[in-house]
Amino acid sequence: MDSTIRKKLEITACKTRIGVIDAVYNAKSGHPGGSLSISDLLTYLYFVKLNIDPKNPKMKQRDRLVLSKGHCAPGLYSILVQRGFFEYDELKKLRHIGAMLQGHPDMKGTPGVDMSTGSLGQGISAACGMALSAKISNDDYKVYAILGDGEIEEGQVWEAAMFAAHNKLDNLTIIVDNNGLQIDGKVCDVCSPMPITDKFEAFGWHVITMNAHDFDDIERAFDEAEKISGKPVAIIQTSVKGKDVSFMENQVSWHGSAPNAEQYALAMEELNKKLSELEG
Amino acid sequence: MSEQIKKATRESYGEALAELGDKYENLIVLDADLAAATKTGIFKKKFPERFFDCGIAESNMMGVAAGLAATGKIVFASTFAMFAAGRAFEQVRNSIGYPHIPVKIGATHAGISVGEDGATHQCNEDIALMRTIPGMTIINPADDVEAKAAVEAAIKHDGPVYMRFGRLAVPVFNDSETYKFELGKGITIKDGTDVTIIATGLMVSEAIEAEKILSESGISARIINIHTIKPLDKELIIKAAKETGVIVTVEEHSVIGGLGSAIAEAVTECCPVPVIKIGVNDVFGHSGPAPELLKEFGLSKENIVEKAKYALTLK
């Protein structure tokens, strides 16, 4: 990847993380950990991959993104702000009464949100339906869905996995965010879905692994995904939950809690420092 | 006489889909390994490229339906009522109801008349479950003519619809030439002044028969067919409450949460009159031939007559 482009993406990802922290802090609740682990992925998708138009969020031929792990809505909202779908101020009203930004994505109320999600395991099925729809009417758009590694414990995910492979949905790419943690602890301790790659391969998917925080590797993975025909693609990204906020990294306690004023200041200081380094 | 013709509404459903497939080129039908029973197989035979079997995975099917409908397709998702409203309740609520995506759910084999398969498959709770989902339209057609009309009405309605069809062949009493289906509007089949009998689905023809018996005893019964349980035709029901003073409801569904509950809720708010509910009385069913089960569970003209006479004593 061109180093200038990479730098731009890193800057955007950092701004996205700042938005996540700001949103969750002001909401006094929400899910920072998993939002931070997918910030680079969202940046790559929204600034490189997705054919979308912030001025025409309902454009028929747009690529679709379904955030199946809907609790990471702060990440999605923050990238939508970066991409120009709505104003930064909306982030600060997340989860407030009367706010546009709901605790989990609401496709009816938020421009740029392609599917209402939040109940785990359901987004991937809707993504399958969208991909099938494109196949039926020979549309070129692509469908992406982001799942959590804990989320894939839901049986519906595997119903969808069967369906996608059976219908050869090669216009569907899912990304499993393997940050290794879920609410009750380590994914491998709670009710291990491992080995993730073998499972999707056994279900008839083309599987690619990638480093979630390296844009060169992200590009390599999506370039490979692009070339696959005849089967759906599952990208398993190895990520750090809470990425780039030192005290949140790899801490299960930051799955679904908001920072207090002191922690907020510390997180913002770290992220702003990183941002000025990137910009400097 | 048209009364002699009997047909299961699931059959009407399958035929309607196949007919409407010509008119609506983006009509897609999904099933969960029950196409032979739900009769979507009739559509599949005619339009194999627009039929998708999701396998025995109803939860995923509802999500797939949501995705298809969110990208502009007209989608019917079909399975037994037990699995559509029961198994996949949360998918229907969160992936279809909450975003108000216009998926049409074709639920067959509803109620006790499933018969021999027994309690696990006799869904007497689906109306109750679906009623609780904001914005969900619920249609329970009474015969072949109404069922076919309802399928197209569902297509034209911009919102999610739960449609309930039966396994058992039932009398075709509506005239296809003159019948008009209006979503959310009840139909007064027979005017009357002493008691109102409000029925839905397969019970409408039993109510019609019951009226004849009551009439012989000099009792004037008003018969109303409520095919759309949600939104409910409150105006028609309140009018009947005011004019006849007592209501008997009949449904092939639990007395908890279905038509009877909906009507009781409506009249208690505006015009409280006694509402006697005929339905499955908070018990599970069991195996047996459907006609015998219907009698056993009181879903018969005889029981309607009995309850109507009892209702008169409450006035």
Image (tube, rainbow, N blue to C red):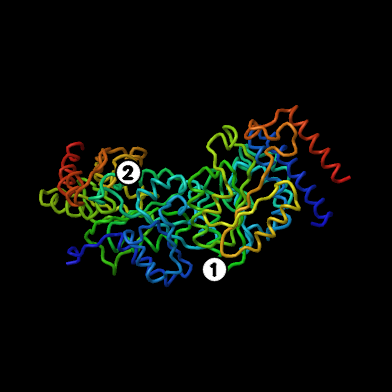
Q: Name the one closer to the observer, B105 or B203.
A: B105
For marks 2 and 1, give the one nearer the viewer. 1
- The answer to whether the residue labelled 2 contacts the one labelled 1, judged by CB atoms less than 8 Å apart, is no
Chain to which the residue tagged by mark 1 belongs: A
> Which quadrant of the rendered structure holds the C terminus of chain A?
top right
Badge 2 amino acid? Ile
Residue drawn at x 54%, y 45% is: A152
Query: What is the distance, in whole Å, between disc 2 and disc 1 at their CAs?
Result: 44 Å
Residue B180 point in image, percent of width and height: 33, 63
SS class of the residue under badge 2?
A: helix
Q: Which mark is residue A137?
A: 1
Residue drawn at x 40%, y 46% is: B87
Chain to which the residue tagged by mark 2 belongs: B
Residue pushed farthest left? B217
Residue drawn at x 83%, y 54% is: A3
Q: Is residue B60 left or right of residue A196?
A: left
**Residue B177 in view (yes/no):** yes
Residue A85 point in image, percent of width and height: 70, 52
> Do callouts 2 and 1 point to residues on the same chain?
no
Q: Which residue is mark 2?
A: B263
